[in-house]
Amino acid sequence: MEFLLLHRQAQYLIETKRQSVPGSVDEKYPYIVENAKSNIGQGREYVLVLDGDGPKPGAIKWIRQQAADIDGFHVFDRKEFVLWLDDLFADDQH
């Protein structure tokens, strides 16, 4: 986990993974899923932000599918993350 975002009554654990060249970062995705499940079970939401062109396309597809099947688990690229934050805080700006 890189940081914890507290917003209203919600807790969001936010983890970032940058992989600019092929390597082993995407091989850790199954562990990230287990970590997400564990934290979601404790009442938190889990956000994974991916960046870089190094992960295998199949690995990104796999972890996005895992997130789609787990309520409270979100996977974003950097641009998607910024949009998600905008939506999360939209009501706070009125």
Image: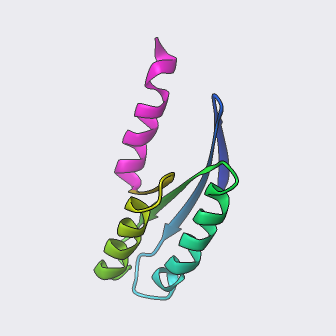
Query: Number of callouts in the render?
Result: 0
Q: Residue at x 59, y 72 (%)?
A: 34
Residue range highlighted in magenta: 77-94
Q: Residue at x 40, y 32 (%)?
A: 87
Q: Residue at x 40, y 82 (%)?
A: 21
Is residue 40 in the magenta section?
no
Compared with 34, 50 (above or below) is above
Q: Nearer the viewer, residue 11 or 16?
A: 11
Q: Is residue 44 left or right of residue 82?
A: right
| Residue 66 visible to the viewer | yes
| Coloring applied to the structure | rainbow
| Residue 1 visible to the viewer | no
Compared with 5, 88 (above or below) is above
Q: Position of residue 32 (x, y in %)?
A: 56, 72
Secondary structure character of the magenta stretch overall: helix
Compared with 83, 19 (above or below) is below
* Quadrant where the image shows the N terminus: bottom right
Q: Position of residue 9 (x, y in %)?
A: 65, 31
